[in-house]
Image (tube, helix red, strand yellow):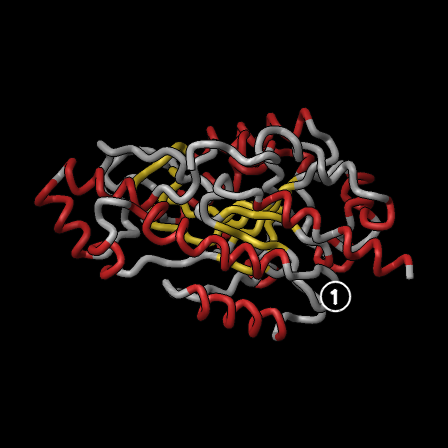
Amino acid sequence: MKTRPAGIGNVHADWMGSLPSKLSAMPLRHLAVPGSHDSFTFWVDVHAPVGPDQKVYVKYLATMFSVLAKKVMVKWSMTQNLTFKEQLDAGIRYFDLRVSSKPGESGNEIYFIHGLFGHKVRDGLLEISSFLGRHRKEVVFLDFNHYYAMEAEHHVYLISMLQEVFGSKLCNNCAVENVTLDYLWEKKYQVIVFYHHPSAQGVPVMWPGNKIPAPWANTTEPIKLIEFLETTLKERDKQGSFHVSQAILTPTVNTVAKGLLWGLRSYLVERNLPTIMSWVEAQRPGVDGVNIITSDFVDLTDFANVVIKLNNLLLSEQNH
């Protein structure tokens, strides 16, 4: 899987701005939007301590085997191969974010995390902001849904960092039905931040987590995943929230043991990707349809392209 498929590159850097006016007038909750899972794991720090999100047995392993165990964990925690800018250029507009302080480190610095510590959050946010400055009609969803080793002051630091980096690009929390691309463009909003923690209550530009449910199948079996995606779509709220379909398979301890040498990419993802992509291709957006769809390894297929194209179904629907 060395070659990159057509459609990866900056082909979709301006896809939102290029949508027909019929679609830019529709609520964003009715459009199909590609997202990535554990979005900031394209780089992890092998020499940093094991992340606070890891189970006790993994911490024990890492202490015992140190760098060797960490190298195995790198294979399992790198769910994205593309950098932030590359994901944005490829059309990804929803980012699933897990953050942590580094226990024992002084100050309030926050890092992206998935198994091992990654980049400083500030650096990632600046990269997004820079992209948005060049692509004024593109809008991103930043879903801060897991926090580790964070005290009240860390939350204050992160919330003020988000306001400092994005400023007037941040969309105020409002009725989800009102959020169309036309509305966002008029207000010059480009960032919707979901902050799943009480610290953000009362901050107008921090949206509550319940406005972006992302049910998680927690399975290694593609058939079970697809059944789960179907069921949760049927149960999707008719109004008041966006919706994330997580088209991802989750490794178990057993899977990690079996696939130790191969890692997540070759062991779990590549062999099951055709099944998952067939499901994605068969979807339709709209009132009862898909909204945001996330996937592991967004560069393995023309994933973003497939999701973005689903919006054409809304055009044909309206033309009848």
Relative to 290, say whether 194 is above or below. Answer: above
Q: How many marks?
A: 1
Relative to 78, say whether 318 is above or below. Answer: below
Name which quarter of the figure residue 220 lies in.
bottom left
Helix, strand or loop status at disc 1? loop
Residue at horizontal 38%, vertical 38%?
111
Farthest-out residue, left: 64
Q: Residues within 10 Å of mark 1 (few under 14, many from 20)?
A: some
Q: Quadrant of the N terminus?
A: top left
> Does residue 44 appear left or right of residue 80 in this picture?
left
Q: Which residue is mark 1?
A: 287
Which amino acid type is marked by label 1?
Answer: Val
Q: Position of residue 154 (x, y in %)?
A: 40, 43
Q: Position of residue 34 (x, y in %)?
A: 60, 48
* In-front residue for pair 316/18: 316
Residue at horizontal 34%, vertical 46%?
266
